[in-house]
Amino acid sequence: MALYECNKCGMSVNTTCGKCNEDLVDDVLKLDNGSNVQISKCPKEHGKIKSPLCCGEDMSCSI
């Protein structure tokens, strides 16, 4: 299961898809302007979300 953890305070969360209960996986969305956004996506293509935030920063993912 993917575990997202805050590098500042240490809070952590596990994420799953609400439709199929599969663990969301860490990924990067490349924008048209060349920048990257960290996202979490369903491995069964049910969608994607911006990765969780804590303390004003993206939480880092470990599996």
Image (cartoon, rainbow, N blue to C red):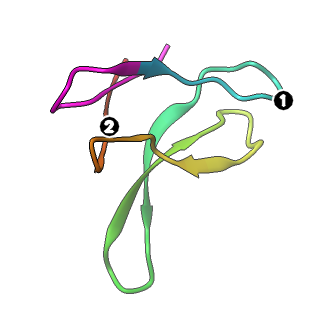
Judge by depth and name the residue closer to the eye, 44 or 56. Answer: 56
Q: Tag 2: residue type?
A: Met
Q: Is residue 60 left or right of residue 19?
A: left
Q: Is residue 5 left or right of residue 23?
A: left
SS of the residue under disc 1: loop
* Image disc number at residue 19: 1
Q: Position of residue 17 (x, y in %)?
A: 71, 29
Q: Tag 1: residue type?
A: Lys
Question: Which residue does the image show at 66% across and 36% down from the upper left?
Answer: 42
Question: Which residue does the image show at 45% across and 20% down from the upper left?
Answer: 13
Question: Which residue does the image show at 26% across and 30% down from the upper left?
Answer: 6
Magenta stretch, main secondary structure class: loop
- Assess disc 1: are there few (<14), some (14-19) or many (≥20) residues with their C-alpha within 10 Å of its C-alpha: few
Q: Is residue 51 magenta?
A: no
Q: Is residue 48 left or right of residue 3?
A: right
Q: Which of the 4 quarters of the picture holds residue 3?
A: top left
> Which residues fall within the magenta stretch?
1-12
Q: Quadrant of the C terminus?
A: top left
Judge by depth and name the residue closer to the eye, 3 or 43. Answer: 3
- The residue under label 2 is 59
Q: Is residue 23 left or right of residue 39?
A: right
The outermost residue toward the bottom is 33
Judge by depth and name the residue closer to the eye, 45 or 10. Answer: 10
Q: CA distance from mark 1 to mark 2?
A: 23 Å
Q: Position of residue 57 (x, y in %)?
A: 27, 48
* Image disc number at residue 52: none
